[in-house]
Image (cartoon, coloured by chain):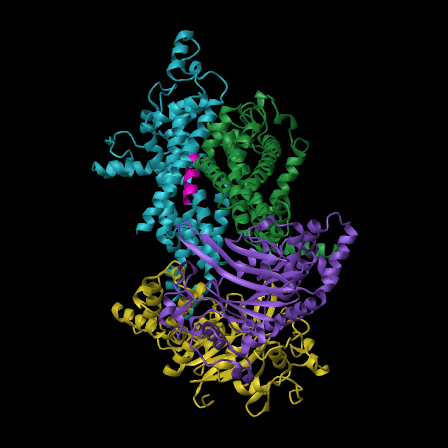
Chain colours: A cyan, B green, C purple, D yellow
Amino acid sequence: MPSLLVTILKRLGWASVVLVGLSILIFSLVRIIPGDPARLALGPTAPEEVVERYRERMHYNESLPVQYYFWLRDVLRGDFGLSTVTKRGVSQDLGEFMPATLELVIWAGIPPIFFALLLGVLGAMYKNRWPDYLIRFSSYIIIATPTFVWAVLFLLIFGYWLPILPSIGGRLSMGFTVPPVTGLMVLDALISGQPDAAWDAFAHLLLPSLALSLGHTMQEARLTRSYMLENGGKDYITMVTSQGVPRDVVNRKFLLRPSVIPTVSIMGLDIAAIFGNAFLVETIFNWPGMSRYAMNAILGKDINAVCGVVMVLGVIFIMTNLLVDVIVMILDPRMRQSRSK
Amino acid sequence: MDESWKETLKRSWLKYSESKITVLGLAIVAGFVFLALLGERIVPYPEHIGSFVDFANASGAPSGAHPFGTDLIGRDVLSRIVGSFRNTLLMGVIVLCISAPIGFMVGVIAGYNKGKPVDTVLMRLTDIFLAIPPLVLALAIASVLEPNMTNSMLAITVMWWPWYARLAYGVSSSLRTENYIIYAELTGVKLPHIIFREILPNCLSSMLTKMTLDMGYVIIMGATLSYAGLGEQAPKPALGSMISQGVKYMPEQWWLTVFPAIAIIVLVLGFNLFGDGISNMLGTDES
Amino acid sequence: MSDKILEIKHLKKYFALKNRLTVKAVDDVSLELGKGETLGLVGESGSGKSTIAYVLVGMYEATEGDILYKGEDLAKAGLYRTLKQKGEIQIVFQDPGSSLNPKRTIRKSLTVPLQVHDKGLSKPRMDARVGELLEAVGLPAEFADKYPRAMGGGERQLISVARALATHPSLVILDEPTSALDVSIQAKVISKLVALQKELMLSYLFITHDLSLMRNVADRVAILYLGRLCEQAPAADFFEKPLHPYTRMLLSSIPVATSEEEELKPAKILSTGEIPSPVNVPPGCAFHQRCKDMLPVCAAERPVMREVSPGHEVCCHLYNAN
Amino acid sequence: MRDIGEGGILLDIKGFSVSFDVYGKVSHVLDGITFRVRSGERVGLVGESGCGKTTTLKAVLRVLPKNAVIGGGNVLFDGRDVFGMAGPELDDMRRRGAGMIFQDPSSALNPVFSVKSQFLTALKYANPAGTSKTRLYEIAVDALDSVMLPDPHRIMDSFPYQLSGGMKQRVCIAMTIAAGRRLLLADEPGTSLDVTIQDQILRLINKLVSEKGLSVVMVSHSVGVIRESTDYVNIMYAGTVVESGATGDVFGNPMHPYTAALMSCVPKLTGRNIAHGIPGRVPDYMNPPAGCRFAPRCPRAKGACHERKPPHAEAAPGHYVSCYFASEAV
């Protein structure tokens, strides 16, 4: 499928433009912060000449575009500079905290899609009968509940009242050691041949990822249901029905695919929202991910760390969207054409 | 003329109330607006909305005098919850009333000039804003500035307008090939007429629908920022910060967490249902 | 030739596509339209008939060629023509669904041209004009405060006609004004258009795919195929002696309603093949691949327009022999 | 023209009524329509937009929209009531009995599936269970061949967006005839296409009908199309059949005022004849006239026309008209 490849390359080109734009945006944003970045980095007690030398070294005396140039040059080499809070390289910090967040987002973002589609299809098939009413009613309540409220409620219920699932205390129970390979705990545990550790890691993931995914899942379900119903009245469905194709085959084959395409195509945005919400959920469940690092960076006005976090999130977001586009292209042949018209 | 106006209203109500659950939404929204307007005039302990201390009654479980209990320094939780509604609603309205017009202008200019450099620049800019996870952007902005309600509104507005830009872009880029737009161009009409008289009326119903549907999400976002400590500051009450305070005393003083949480859920639920009703009402306008 | 209101000479309109391809939407078309006359411009999809309309009203600039309106060249003017010219050359679009803004009342739609072309008209005068325009197309004055959705397709098209009349036009381009309508409604619109033409001395460029309709309203008929003219003749002559093989295929393909008409159709020429994409116009005569009477020269050389009898021109190698 | 009335009755629609529930209001679209199709016969339904032509065709296959309510009457296919059929019987009728060619070929094919995938799924159920995939593929290719599509293998691998309107229409026809159905329900065939392409499609349908001995119900708003390709015609107005008879009789001697008015509105090649249309508008289906639905627009309407629906009576041999004044010259 050469056209698919061309489209991917084109998207990558645009993605880099967006990333450059994002970097300018975030770079200017953090430089607007009132206060002297060098002084902030070295603390109030550092002697002035040390601060001045630091300024010199970090190019803080240059104009903003020049500073941006030096910063971007380093970023392209994978160097986000030093964190003023942890006093370590931002890249190193990211490497340490990112996998935990990533694992959480993956679990919250991907498996629930299947539930969403299932619920959407069920709702459409049993339109205005009890399964549909049940799904719709619960979706209203679930969507209305903010993610952090879910997290707090889960903590209250499963952490204190009904402690059947681990709710505080990171990614793994005491007593397990899993050598890091991918940084994704469940996977690493399986790789190292410890199914019980994998199960334990999964149990730790369950509550936070559920809190993150519930709202999105129900929203995707609603979307799927409404597209199923809308497409159900289309001529191409009437046509196969009129030719005697059994109803379940019509639904499963000819109605499902066009109806899930719109749901799938907004998944990229859902993933972005999940990333954002992960910040709070991680704090609530004491999850050793990016959140505390990023929160500290934001509150401590740690310029390099903030830029690093946002840029990495931007890259992940763009990659996710690219992936989603590819999936949509596979599902919908029309998208494989170049979108010239 | 008057008669047809009544007819329209009646038909709109029929469409709105087609699904009974949206009527419940309207009732919830009306109730919250009512409570928000009255605020301190209706709560049992108006002075508890501010910085009031009554250690004698601190950390009291729900009781007849304090149905939702009292907080760590003895303030009535019910009064504080009701006292927070006005700012919560105001925030939603202000954020949407600023971000929708901005988004509309960006989207309509890009969409009307589809395929030209203006389009590319504006829509890529929109993409950049969308590329940052919304909460992260809001957190970054809110933390760079002083943490207070105005700045959290600003942060949410900055991340919200791109959605309206996308909406207006979609509508206007398809409208620009409509014959009545082409006719207006051919006959020598000026651009503002095309944007505000021809395109805007066609965007209005979808914008309004989205605005009502978004109320709930803006409220969620505001509560989330406030939970993170970046919204309304003490001693003023905000649902998010009340929950984040309550979490620390969690299983024992559950009422500090549970009641504000329920308040958010019901509030957002009300607006979501209301939005669905508005969408039913404005959606199938044709034929 | 002073009674000619419009002369199109060797008009070309090319569109560049992204992948370096060119669509030759209109490729060397020459037409003339006399004052008070109706010229029927007939073609199937991809024939470029609408492109010609859009160039005439200024939506596009011509790639090459001249468009003389009352002696003034508009080919390169695009939208930068004078306000007077904009008012005098008006258009009625095909789709009654998109001609009027669904969110604005008829009054508002009709005042759009008035605000531009009759600047400073007072509110009561404006309302009076709207009333006059509605009356001119035979619609009741109450329609002014209705929305398009409250009206049928025929009524919407009549409103579009009224809007075109607002600027006192002399040339009206009718871009398939009735092709989306049922015949009983089409008849209403067409009879109104014909009456208005007599009353206001309008010249019509009538773009359509419906030859039967042209038999009844056009003074002259021109046939387009893939951006090129095939044949052009006075209506009576055209329907009696169609010459171009494409014209004959077209005429013989029309399903007719009565047996008298059946006798007027040329001997059945079975329609074959698909209409090629205008991106890929065949070399030589654009029609040669579908033509039964193809000569060897047809694939190689593009035929030129030739007058075979007074006013009857045809662009075909078959008629080049003498 | 072929003989009429020889074969058995394949489709018999008797006093069939359908209404639609629209936001709690009832739109009475089909009002007791009656007509029959004998096997081997080509029957036309002519009427203007919204008169219920497509609804009639969909009713035959029982694929009416969900908000449709059957008001009365029967649709008999091969003597069996379509709306009384049990599942397997209905499936059998749809798979091997009757098939519909939809008006808009672009919306009738699923945009995200290849022609092959749609075609073979439909064929799988229309053929005996266990027919091999290769066999089904052959059947499909043969059908594409018989609708004169060049390079059927390439067509099979194409997606709808890669085909022109005429090709899509042919694919739809191929899908309908491939399973050996006996009745074709053609909804405005070729209307959305160019005249020369429409001509090809109509010729193709006529050829298939005569070669395979199929019956066809052809729906069109175009008097010309119906006159040229049917043996028997029903004129529909606002959900009722107002006139029916042999095609030549009806168009040669229209007896219902609506038919006459419609005929006069059609622009003709004989030229210089500009009609003024039919006064008034199509009735509001939510609140249709109590008597003849054409009465409010009819120049001949008198008291009875407004009160009672006129019967569909034989006004001349084999020529039925729903009008109290059918015998008066139009």
User: Residues in magenta?
Assistant: A267-277
**C91 in magenta:** no
Name the outermost residue toward the left.
Answer: A193
- Which image quarter: residue B239? top right
* B193 lies left or right of D157: right
Is C37 situated above or below A143?
below
Is B246 situated above or below D70?
above
Residue D296 in the image: x percent, y percent? 69, 75
**A269 in magenta:** yes
Q: Nearer the viewer, residue A136 or B131?
A: B131
* D157 lies left or right of C171: left
Residue A282 in sight in this render: yes
Residue B93 in the image: x percent, y percent? 60, 37
- Which image quarter: residue D151? bottom left
Q: How many marks?
A: 0
Is B240 situated above or below B215?
above
- Which image quarter: residue A125? bottom left
Name the outermost residue toward the bottom.
Answer: D317
